[in-house]
């Protein structure tokens, strides 16, 4: 993915695409950015790991396990990806 | 001439509908090869063949529903020459006499490492991968396979889907999904009713310290890329399996003749399905596998269970079941044993507790672990020792690494 493509909307779309692969029942436009994802989507720890692996693979972002706890909402994830991507440039 | 029969697929499934043959007359088959796909209420089950030989005749046609134990095909043993194929006669559809598998599946050696395909077999695409491809609108023939012998796996399809980037709206016929959910509910109802009717359960629980295991795992994971990290659930699986190896009365089956210990520890993992229902297919030979292998197996099993594609040995072999409802936030599980198994271990949510340690007060992370066991096969005393052993193993995570 090239730098100019990774706008916040693109990031959201990628993350939602990962999420809907794992939880097909999710409607992308019904997910609220600032509400805990766990309260909106039925995700167990294996699902959650797969979400993070999907983000890692698609957006080329490394996510240390120590950061897992800080990622609780869609906004957290988008912020995180933006920040990590900026560090890469 | 070998009769290849429809294997047992767990106590709540006594029949299945033939979906697909993956071999034809004249094809060689090797031990563990997936030769057919049978649709059950819980999954499209990939039927493995544990005989070596050559397919002589396929006896059951696509779309036919057959009982467990029905001959699906005849095989020629290595060296055996083909007799003239017998006259095709209308097959009687009544239940064959020997429906109860008598532990046949359990006595068979576990598969070595996934299905081994004959050298000139066509490129193999797992039904789950095929289904996923269909739902994502991917032409499966264009997907590069990275599995054994170039087999196309789910992750290959996911990769292909990611590169195509076509957000295909998944709108499969909803009725089929609802029908399946109803059928699955019936299967679960039958198995659980049988369990509560026949099995005199007893329950034990223990609060197990987890700090050592979790910090050990965190340290181990810190050095690894996200794709190589291991979940705490894997340590729990390994601890239960290792303990079950030492306490064999919890690892096996209760049959008409009494308790029959299993030949290996094949841990059934309770997996909830999106849209309701659950399956508890086996990870084979858990004590013999290291944590990375187990994590790989668990990831694969959960993905395939949710995609509705499992293998016959995974359905028939579980010798003890583990359920983990901690992710859903409950403290304790009181399990129902899946017959003919005799034990189920349940984990709740790991949580911080105020604990008295060495006369002082400490905050410790603990998990409520429960055992539901069949009192016909074991007694509470042994159950307590079994549970304590699981706890002790969790205090020595490096022993579980192997």
Image (cartoon, coloured by chain):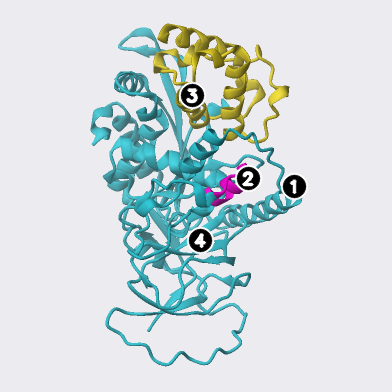
The CA span between labels 1 and 4 is 26 Å
Q: CA distance from mark 4 to mark 2?
A: 26 Å
Residue B53 lies, in percent from the top left, at: 34, 75
Where in the figure is residue B196, as x and y percent of width and height? 58, 52
- Asked if both marks, 1 and 4, belong to the same chain, the answer given is yes
- Between B367 and B304, the one nearer to me in the picture: B304
Q: Is residue B384 visible?
A: no
Magenta part of the chain: B128-139
Secondary structure under the numbered disc 4 in the rendered image: loop
Circle 1 residue: B174
Q: Pointers 2 and 1 in contact (CB under 8 A)?
A: no
Subunit under mark 3: A
Label 3 neighbour load within 10 Å: few <14, some 14-19, many 20+ = many
> Which residue is denoted by mark 2 in the rendering?
B135
Q: Earlier in the sequence, mark 1 or mark 4?
A: 4
Q: Which mark is residue A52?
A: 3
- Quadrant into which the N terminus of chain B falls: bottom left
* N-term mark: 2 or 1: 2
Circle 4 chain: B
Q: Earlier in the sequence, mark 4 or mark 2?
A: 4
The spot of residue A22 in percent (x, y) is: 57, 34
Tell me, yes or no, if residue B43 can be seen here. Answer: yes
Chain B tint as drawn: cyan
Residue at mark 4: B9
Q: Is label 1 in a helix, a strand or a loop?
A: helix
């Amino acid at each position: 993915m090239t730098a100019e493509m990774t706008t916040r909307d693109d990031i959201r779309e990628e993350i939602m695409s990962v999420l809907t692969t794992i939880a097909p029942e999710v409607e992308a436009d019904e997910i609220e950015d600032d509400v805990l994802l766990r309260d909106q989507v039925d995700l167990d720890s294996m699902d959650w790991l797969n979400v993070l692996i999907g983000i890692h693979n698609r957006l080329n972002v490394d996510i240390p396990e120590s950061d897992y706890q800080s990622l609780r909402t869609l906004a957290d994830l988008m912020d995180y990806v933006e920040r990590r991507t900026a560090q890469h440039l | 001439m070998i009769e290849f029969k429809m294997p047992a697929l767990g106590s709540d499934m006594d029949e299945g509908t033939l979906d697909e043959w993956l071999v034809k007359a004249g094809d060689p088959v090797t031990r563990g090869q997936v030769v057919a796909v049978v649709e059950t209420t819980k999954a499209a089950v990939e039927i493995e063949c544990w005989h070596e030989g050559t397919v002589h005749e396929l006896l059951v046609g696509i779309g036919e529903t057959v009982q467990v134990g029905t001959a699906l095909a005849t095989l020629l043993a290595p060296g055996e020459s083909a007799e003239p194929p017998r006259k095709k006669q209308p097959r009687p559809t009544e239940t064959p006499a020997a429906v109860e598998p008598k532990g046949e599946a359990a006595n068979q050696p576990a598969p070595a490492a996934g299905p081994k395909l004959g050298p000139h077999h066509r490129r193999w695409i797992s039904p789950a991968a095929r289904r996923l491809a269909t739902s994502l609108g991917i032409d499966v023939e264009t997907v590069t396979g990275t599995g054994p012998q170039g087999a196309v796996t789910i992750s290959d399809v996911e990769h292909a889907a990611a590169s195509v980037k076509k957000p295909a709206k998944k709108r499969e016929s909803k009725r089929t999904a609802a029908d399946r959910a109803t059928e699955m509910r019936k299967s679960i109802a039958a198995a659980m009713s049988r369990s509560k009717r026949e099995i005199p359960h007893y329950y034990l629980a223990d609060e197990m310290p987890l700090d050592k295991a979790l910090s050990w795992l965190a340290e181990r994971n810190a050095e690894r890329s996200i794709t190589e990290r291991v979940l705490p659930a894997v340590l729990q699986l390994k601890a239960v399996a290792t303990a079950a190896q030492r306490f064999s009365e919890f690892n096996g089956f209760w049959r008409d003749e009494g308790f029959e210990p299993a030949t290996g520890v094949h841990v059934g993992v309770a997996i909830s399905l999106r849209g309701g229902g659950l399956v508890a297919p086996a990870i084979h030979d858990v004590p013999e596998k290291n944590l990375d292998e187990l994590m790989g197996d668990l990831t694969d099993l959960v993905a395939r269970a949710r995609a509705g594609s499992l293998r016959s040995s995974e359905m028939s072999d579980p010798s003890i079941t583990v359920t983990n409802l901690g992710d859903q936030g409950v403290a304790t599980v009181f399990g129902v044993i899946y017959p003919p198994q005799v034990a189920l271990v349940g984990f709740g949510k790991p949580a911080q507790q105020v604990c008295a340690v060495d006369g002082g007060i400490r905050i410790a992370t603990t998990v409520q672990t429960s055992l539901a066991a069949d009192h016909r096969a074991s007694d509470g005393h042994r159950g307590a020792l079994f549970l304590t052993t699981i706890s002790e193993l969790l205090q020595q995570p490096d022993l579980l690494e192997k």
